[in-house]
Amino acid sequence: MTTSASLRPISDLTLDELRAAVSEAGQPDYRVEQVAGWVYRSTISGFEQMSNMPKALRQALAERFRFHALEEKTALLSTDGETRKIVLTLPDGELIESVLMRYPQRTDGTGAERSTVCVSTQVGCPIKCTFCATGLMGFGRNLTSGEILDQALHFLRWTRGHPPIVRNVVFMGMGEPLLNYDATMAAVDRLVDPQCAGMGIHRMTVSTSGWLPGIARLTDDPLAIRLAVSLHAPIDDLRTSLVPLNKRFPISQLMASLRDYQRKTGRRITIEYILLSGVNDSPALACELVALLRGIDSHVNLIPMNPVSDLPFSPSPWPVVDEFHQILRDAGMICTVRREMGRDIKAACGQLRAEVQETVLQSA
């Protein structure tokens, strides 16, 4: 017997596959755009709510597909109301995380309210960065394009009733996106397609720990998604101890890849650098970072660590953060310190998912 969980989610379908499904249901081609509008740009939760669709088409779609690729299991809201973190259940029972970050207008009155959603691309992660809660899990499997995409759609629907609406999507959650390249970029494609979610490609950012084959593919990809690189150290020995992938692709190779990417695309690269007390936050390492990035158009994003009880690292004290930041600024670099968001709701990547998974195992 076919169960709902065994059906393919409709968000997994390309537009061509959706067109074929509508045609097989005996419906004209113009219905494809209407169905896509309901799936990608509405707040409904099921096929039966597609009010301008013929009943026969709604039934045909419901018999073949699920409306959602995943279901919300747990949600936590930070005390300031700006961060909403959720654990989502996949059809096979696996758990992943997604995070909504809501940014108010600046205190000086500039800018605008905006929301960003951070999505996962894998169950767990094979990179095993030593400071990351997700790295403790090991690797489960890749997500499908629909499972990646549906995380963004979940918050797009939610923020239509709780603005500001999501305008930015960052592929910086659980997993290494460039090791799941095809599914990740298929999700990006439907997020930016005017017939689907219709978001701007300049509002999409993919983060990598330095998977060079993926950076090479991204360099030539017609989808001009922004690139962020999790660097975390400017010298090989230290970076290898934090990001084991560095042993396979050392910093010299990574920098060569980034220069090639920038030469061909002309796009600025975000350099992510999580600050760990007494590990990678010294003034000498700040100077090494300045030297390493010389000649690369970059924006360095310094990230205060969210503590994880099972990991032997702690956040750098704020005076240390300020000094590191100032050294980069004095060297003429574009550098910001990421706002701390959601520390009170287990904001570290994989932290909430790990706690929920432990509860599930204990109750089994």
Image (cartoon, helix red, strand yellow):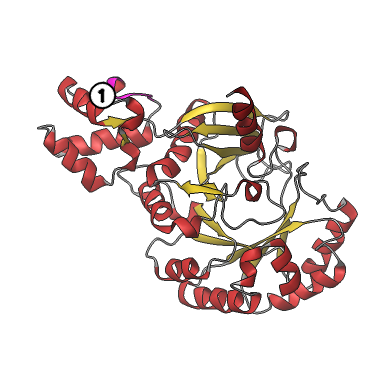
Q: Is any atom of residue 121 visible in this view?
A: no
Q: Identify which amino acid the numbered label 1 is placed on.
A: Met
Q: Nearer the viewer, residue 83 or 256?
A: 256
Q: Residue at x 56, y 38 (%)?
A: 97
Q: Which residue is mark 1?
A: 1
Q: In the current view of this chain or complex, which residue is farthest to the left?
A: 26
Q: Residues within 10 Å of mark 1 (few under 14, many from 20)?
A: few
In the image, residue 185 sits, relative to residue 51, either above or below, namely below
Q: Which residues are magenta?
A: 44-48
Query: Going by the image, does 92 lie left or right of 130?
Result: left
Q: Is residue 142 above or below residue 54?
A: below
Q: Position of residue 73 (x, y in %)?
A: 54, 26
In this rendering, position of residue 269 left or right of residue 142:
right
The reply to whether residue 7 is visible in this rendering is: yes
Most prominent secondary structure in the magenta stretch? loop
- Residue 356: image x %, image y %? 62, 31
Question: Residue 5 location, x and y as percent?
Answer: 36, 29
- Quadrant containing the C terminus is top right
Query: Is residue 174 within the magenta segment?
Result: no
Q: Residue at x 40, y 46 (%)?
A: 144
